[in-house]
Image: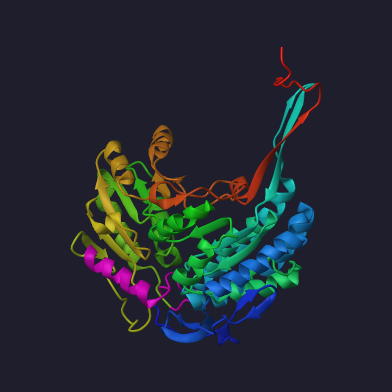
Amino acid sequence: MTDQPTRHVPADLPGRIQHYIGGAFVDSADGATFDVLEPVTNDVYLQAAAGKKADVDRAVAAARDAFVNGPWPRMLPRERSRILHRIADLVESRDARLAELESFDSGLPITQALGQARRAAENFRFFADLVVAQSDDTFKVPGRQINYVNRKPIGVAGLITPWNTPFMLESWKLGPALATGNTVVLKPAEFTPLSASLWAGIFEEAGLPEGVFNLVNGLGEEAGDALVKHPDVPLISFTGESSTGQLIFANAAPYLKGLSMELGGKSPAVVFADADLDAAIDATIFGVFSLNGERCTAGSRILVERAVYDEFVERYAEQAKRVVVGDPQDPRTEVGALVHPEHYDKVVSYIEIGKTEGRLVAGGGRPEGFETGNYVAPTVFADVPSSARIFQEEIFGPVVAITPFDTEEEALALANGVRYGLAAYVWTNDLRRAHNFSQAIEAGMVWLNSNNVRDLRTPFGGVKASGLGHEGGYRSIDFYTDQQAVHITLGKVHNPTFGKGA
């Protein structure tokens, strides 16, 4: 169903956004800017500074100076933790404003944007606590030797973030990078720079030392590329498309940088005949249509056992037709506007391809009553063969492909039969099948009879084309620190003797 757009424009929107380098807001060295659109009208509503190599060089120099000469890397973990908790407090206190701006800039439904703002606060709290509670390994050989691990921050971390839930995903990288004592240069997505511009004020108010946080706006091929290739940036954490990840991998190789990359997904949701269909339908509807379908872990391929396939497809399609499409700022809205006209055109092109590959049972284009803006009706294709492009390729929008299977072996082959391997969802009441099947799926994360609800202590990441490395919990601490082994001899030194003759 649809709700006619009512248009809500947040008060006090900025007309321009600058970089934030060395504790000051600055324009690009060459004065260049780029247009930022809002997705309901596709009107330009602000100009953002367009960073290039000179701006990245300036930001990295500020971050490097703060790392070498500033107090942040040398603070006790408890001292850094206090500042991170103050950051979380400030984010929580401003969650409504953050959500309003995020929804306006990205097209996310306001209620979902509010949830993402609160998650951002929780990310900082989690790493603030973890860095204080952290313990490192010690190994003893009684009377002879002690060996212990000394963790050290690495330096300047380059953080490149996507446009789908920008503020929250920025916090997911900023939290552990800062908690472990690194300094950072953040390059937010050019489609959605608005909420990122708020970090500087939050960090200043929380007491983060000058130069620890730096932000350079700009295009990926200019600012992002310069950050990846900078010799004084030993770490790159990137979330985005697999093709961009391949390019970053190649460009970072000459510098032997540490890389953490969470890339694309085409995640399966496998529904067996013995599953709780009510729960499975609710979860798979939410799993692909929440966040406007613009989520890396979306269960965008639903594999359903033949015995319940027809019932599942009919019920799923009818429920999808009732998903509320509307203005992102309306609390009733469940699916808002896609982020940008370029992305809208991509998603619509896949829908047209899907009409030749499967049976359209819901949606299929622009919803009635939405003549402008990047609106796509929740779209469901059934009877989709595994060779179809809408089965194989990441669409990143409110589009789902449903495919039947007859046996567990066929279901597993379908689940694993794509280049991606980020997430998977399995619905069955057979305990043995649930665990065996889940462990056979080629995915970094699997949810059994549940939706995408994460424990922040667990690893987040994918296999195959879905990523390189894992973050989350101690995996994030591992990525953002060097682990130095220190060996101490307690007794007589037992050295082999060279050079003393017979």
Asked whether the viewer can see residue 379, the reply is yes
Of 462 and 39, nearer the camera is 462
Which residue is found at the position 60% from the left and 87% from the top? 12
> Does the segment drawn in magenta span residue 192?
no
- Where 269 sits versus 103, above or below? above
In the image, which residues are magenta?
A: 327-354
Q: Where is residue 370 shown, x and y percent of the image?
A: 35, 81
Which residue is found at the position 74% from the left and 26% from the top? 140
Q: In which image quadrant can residue 119 be found?
A: bottom right
Q: Residue furthest left?
A: 356
> Does the segment drawn in magenta span residue 351?
yes
Q: Residue furthest top?
A: 502
Q: Which image quarter is the C terminus in?
A: top right
Which residue is found at the position 38% from the left and 63% from the top? 396
Q: Is residue 262 left or right of residue 361?
A: right
Q: Where is residue 107 shown, x and y percent of the image?
A: 46, 75
Q: In which image quadrant can residue 300 be found?
A: bottom left
Of 26 and 454, nearer the camera is 26
Q: Where is residue 326 shown, x and y percent of the image?
A: 42, 77
Q: Is residue 123 left or right of residue 252?
A: right
Asked whether the viewer can see residue 165, the reply is no
Which residue is found at the position 72% from the left and 15% from the top? 501
Q: How is the image coloured?
A: rainbow
Q: Which image quarter is the N terminus in?
A: bottom left
* Total numbered labels placed on residues in the image: 0
- Where 341 sits versus 314, above or below? below
Q: Is residue 348 left or right of residue 201?
A: left
- Where 140 sits versus 257, above or below? above
Of 57 and 84, nearer the camera is 57
Q: Where is residue 210 shown, x and y percent of the image?
A: 73, 70
Q: Residue furthest front?
A: 501
